Amino acid sequence: MTTTAQGLGRLDAAAVAEALGQGNCGEVAGDAGRRAQYSADASNYRQIPLAVVFPRERQHVLNALAVCRRLGVPVTSRGAGTSTSGQAVGSGVVLDFSRYFNRLLALDPQARTATVQPGIVLDDLQTAAAEHGLLFGPDPSTHSRCTLGGMIGNNACGTHSVAWGRTSDNVVELEVVTYRGTVVRLGEMTQAEIDEAVAAGGDRGRLIASLHRLAQSNLATLRTELGRFPRQVSGYALEHLLPEHRFDLAKALVGSEGTLAVILSATVRLISPPRARALVVLGFRDACAAADAVPALLDHRLLALEGLDQALTDIVTRPETRAAIDTLPAAQAWLFAELGGTTDELPQRARALTAAAEQAAGFVGSEIVTDSARARRLWRIREDGAGLATRLPDGSEAWPGWEDAAVPPDRLGAYLREFTELLEQHHLQGAVYGHFGEGCLHVRIDFDLTTEEGTAVFRSFVTDAAKLIAAHGGSLSGEHGDGQARSELLPMMYGPEVMALFEQFKDIWDPDNGLNPGMIVQPLPVDSNLRVSPHRTPLPLVTVLPFHADDGDFAKATRRCVGVGKCRTASHRGDVMCPSYRVTLDERDSTRGRARLLYEMTQGEVITDGWRSTEVRDALDLCLSCKGCSVDCPVGVDVATYKSEFLHHHYKGRFRPASHYTMGWLPLLSRLAARIPRVVNALTASRLSPLIKRLGGIAAEREVPRFTEQTFLSWFRTRTPGGDGHRGPVVLWVDSFNNHFSPEVLKAGVEVLEHAGFRVQVPDGTQCCGLTWITTGQLGIARRIAGRTVAALAPAARAGTPVVGLEPSCTAALKSDLPELLDGNTDAQALARATVTLAELLVHHAPDWQPPRVEARSISQTHCHQHATSGFSADSTLLDAMGVDNDSLDSGCCGLAGNFGFERGHYDVSVAAGEQVLLPAVRAASHDTVVLADGFSCRTQIAQQTDRRGTHLAELLARALPSHRPSA
């Protein structure tokens, strides 16, 4: 077997990109930023590619292979880049199929098949299939972003493989192209079809002849060594070449990890799902006891049987998910068993399943979950497992590397006990979860890859674990593939004869070793190319913000991103992350893409100019600073904070964009405008408006909000307090936005608070949370402003007086940003604890107050920062008590996001983000439906893009009070 690696030393990225660009290969990128973004997947591994190609059509793929073949450059196929084994990164050219080569080509409801391009996202196929009452059976936890090509590459399985099998069980036909350019259509073949193909000759005939000879010469080995149990995924699936399996070359190619051919299209089988489903949660004293119970439970015709350890649930912080966990049966481990059938039969079958579980040693309790919303929240824990498990309860980092081993289910308990002992012997720990029903365990382990000693422990452990899995008749990989993580270990699972067959199989398909070299055969060492390595010295980057959760290490903070790619989800399911990616569908604009660039910046190898990097600056440009990723990312990647830190250093001592001086300094400029509001409003609405916007870095398409003629503070200082104040004082935070642009919101807040029995106070003087300076990276000024604010509010916070905020972004800043800016300041911490939203105050501090009845329908837009810090549960409780029939929109970010939507160059993305869910929902709402939006940005976006007006919760409450008088 020859290798293309020899060509790598002769070429640089620019030359390869130029050749690809001239070869009509689609969109080609060879810049440092793109190469950094594609340097890693969801594994421990990192390889810097020479170029990235985004093919738009079939011919682009063929052309790219021809160019790479001429240059002697290897090719790595990539879908969503969510592989945990390292097979989606390479040192040559990466073909990203997810961006453009992602169409549904055909769907036949009668035949129950679909033909797709490899870059199609699984959920997109499921949506199309659902219109015909069908679905694709395999469903990995990454279903919202993984591609069919990637699933075929790894032979992905997912939660329901107990019932519906692996990807290979559901593939009908593949059209592929080899590195040498031979296009072949693959599927089952009869002996007559084989003979016909061989007789026809040509590249296809020679390929089929060689594969048929390989199978016929090794029938006994294929029958005894391969395909012994469903999750034996490691190596090549040569068992499908057996005559009893109809010499199915398509299935034999599934799981080959892009090492044999490049997929051009795939025809897959669809199934009809059951009419109804039921979730049964079974609690056990530990994960081993849960594993022991599996064989008996499999007799109950399950759709799924998933397991998770308490070590995984202990990591969950998301409030609504935490609430679901806290009501689970008290246990140290759980099995989630799903049944499918008719509504009438499921209760009896659930009871029978529970009765069977009760006979198992270590069983401690059960629950039949009938609430579908709660069931979804519980399944979400399992789906987020790969991300959640990367940080253990003690805060230590945990890594893949041995996260996918599988054994026959009747061996699972014994294997798990010995595996646990092996962890202890190596002084390691990890949270176990996975597909217990098929004997496949996932676990992230706290390897220390930052030191030579820790890396040696990593290698020693995976070597011992490979021996252990072989002793139990298991497979190194159960669905994630071998990649660089396990290929070197395959000889411990398979003997020399099988390994020789794998080599021959690869050589028949790819004699030049041009496709994903180093995977499965001729493997790369398991401990080379590590993304976190003691052999690289990160740049000494000093930060302003403390990054305590990451030990003050900015590189460690950015490597929180382990690549699971949840930020690449384009559909809205109650998450905010990531608004700009949902618009552009460009890896650069995902949370992961930005985190990758920032991490590479800390390494100084591809991104070489540190804080001054233009590649990082440009990638962060479309970050809305919505903070959605801080809570929606399973690992808590917080790009908004990283962006603030980066912008602070990037522009230090240099001129900033004009919007940083206008939008960033808006609170101060607003105070000046408050002296002559009519003049300012006249100017911003005059013929000078385009010039003013241009000089201020403001989008020409945006209407500048009008300043109020009387600020809230001016009004409040001249009013007579109302109510009896029997509940004591509350400090109303007077934010700059509502004070200067919509004082009616703050006035309504005063009316509601006084009606509820609070005595309303406002801070002396004009205060500011500093958010606009934080988001534009002016951290020095932000810190000074935050210090003054904390000093002013310290007496109230120390006294335990609630500080209620009506603008969610400012409330979130008081709760989370100020303690970070003023690290170690106890008054800032006290203020954070004292700060509440209006709904939180009324629900938790005045539980006996009866809110006014409002017999109305509403739709609500949760502000991004509230989503990230407080959530909407208190608001929901209050609206229920008011009698409001509210529909909380799964809309994500409104798109305006403070200064972002006003800045020149952001308008199109800003509006497109709003147009995905929020703005169409507002337009479709009936005239008498209230549009609830507490955020000033949200209300502004709604007002400027629809004919409706957003209403603050305080306004809705105030209007319904019996003593309400409309404010002037």
Image: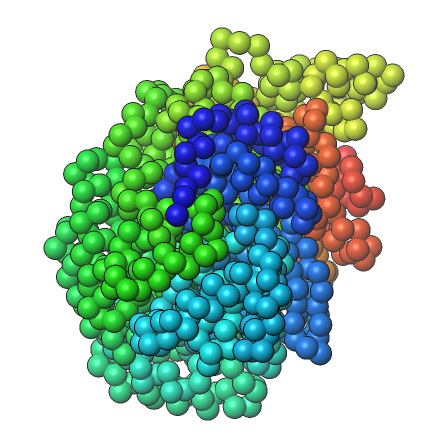
Instruction: Tell me if residue 180 comes above or below residue 129 in the rendering.
Output: above
Q: Is residue 539 visible?
A: yes
Q: Quadrant of residue 117?
A: bottom right
| Left or right of 100 on screen, residue 71 | left
Question: Where's residue 737, x and y in %?
Answer: 64, 30
| Residue ID at (51%, 27%) | 13
The structure residue drawn at horizontal position 87% and vertical position 16%, both measured from the top left corner, is 687
Report the residue at 76% width, 29% height from top: 702
Q: Is residue 765 above or below residue 565?
A: above
Q: Position of residue 73 (x, y in %)?
A: 49, 37
Q: Is residue 966 left or right of residue 224?
A: right
**View extreme (right): residue:** 687
**Front residue of this view, candidates 298 and 15:** 15
- Residue at (74%, 53%) from the top-left corner? 921
Q: Quadrant of the C terminus?
A: top right
Please tell me in which quadrant of the rendered image residue 825 appears. top left
Query: Where on the picture, by quarter, is residue 334?
Result: bottom left
Residue 141 visible (yes or no) = no
Q: Report the side of 417 relative to 588 (left or right).
A: left
Depth check, front residue: 699 or 539: 539
Q: Is residue 383 above or below residue 733?
A: below
The picture places residue 613, in percent across and down from the top left corner, at 49, 20
Residue 37, percent from left and from top: 49, 35
Q: Say if 18 sits above or below 760 in the image.
A: above
